[in-house]
Image (spheres, rainbow, N blue to C red):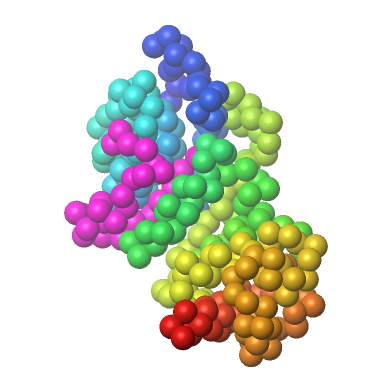
Amino acid sequence: MEHPLEILRRRGLRPKKSWGQNFLADDRHLSAIARACELSPGDRVVEFGAGLGHLTRHLAATGAHVVAVERDRDLVPLLREQVEGLDVEVVEANAATFSLVELSRERGSPLVVVGNLPYHLSTEILFHVFDQREVVRRVVFLLQKEVTERIAAPPGGKEYGVLSVLLQLYAEVDIPHRVPARAFVPRPEVESAVIRCRMRQGPLADPGDETFFRRLVKAAFAQRRKTLGNALRAGRLADPEAIARALEAAGIDPGRRAETLSVEEFARLSRLLSGAVEHEEDA
């Protein structure tokens, strides 16, 4: 397949820097990303940011049906040319608003989601996909290396944080492949890696109210140097007495810091504290 810059040059186009367009055309890395998706013939895979179809072709070679989503209307006709004759459906749409639920219901099958995401939109798109996790089997995204390390981090280190807790509650995560900056055109200023999220059958632990769980985790990490008790009080999730009682009932020392809590401990604390807040509101 042609080099991305050659394909663009024929149409008088250039990568859009403001859109975070960095094309990957190295077959070794593209093949590794496709393998990480763990696809079989007949599977349905949604590729976000399909671009010029370099990864799309590797995905189609697995025998899976590919829905290639691309929002750049300048690239869509080029993408269609590059995947002509393959089992690929090209859709002009924005990944950040694309309905995986609707697609899954139309086609009657769960989905694998993959993509080389613009770095500035990666967190937004990740949460958009996880909010539709009931129809998603696996997520495989090529992201900034530091972001993948935060998602996959275990408790206890500086990388462990909001992304780690919120995503690991619903998925088993690993980093199966790394991609150096020199493999992209244009070359980005950061290194990249593949994050793979295998969706769990159910959450790792019951968090109670999911909206409250997110608020709790964000408040806990908002001021990492503070103890957990002080951070939660500063977040004003509940009155100080309710926070103290919930921490005691959860068996969590308020003097600990957020990065030392496991996902299960966060879920237990969320369940207890959200229950206390609901009781206060009903009183």
Residues shaded magenta: 91-117
Which corner quadrant holds the N terminus? Answer: top left
Give the x, y percent position of residue 219: 64, 64
Please give the name of the residue rendered at 38% of the width and 27% of the height, measured from the top-left corner. Answer: 72
Give the x, y percent position of residue 38: 44, 57
Please give the name of the residue rendered at 59% of the width and 30% of the height, measured from the top-left corner. Answer: 184
Q: Nearer the viewer, residue 32 or 172?
A: 172
Number of numbered labels in the structure image: 0
Location of residue 233 (image quadrant): bottom right
Q: Is residue 193 left or right of residue 110?
A: right
Give the x, y percent position of residue 27: 52, 35
Q: Is residue 232 left or right of residue 202?
A: right
Tell me, yes or no, whether the highlighted magenta stretch contains residue 75. Answer: no
Please give the name of the residue rendered at 19% of the width and 54% of the height, measured from the top-left corner. Answer: 106
Q: Is residue 269 left or right of residue 154?
A: left
Please give the name of the residue rendered at 68% of the width and 59% of the height, measured from the top-left corner. Answer: 222
Q: Residue furthest front?
A: 283
Q: Nearer the viewer, residue 125 or 182?
A: 125
Above or below: residue 226 compared with residue 271 = above
Q: Is residue 72 visible?
A: yes
Above or below: residue 34 compared with residue 251 = above
Location of residue 282 (image quadrant): bottom left
Give the x, y percent position of residue 29: 56, 40
Tell me, yes or no, whether the highlighted magenta stretch contains residue 113. Answer: yes
Q: Is residue 220 visible?
A: no
Q: Nearer the viewer, residue 98 or 116?
A: 98
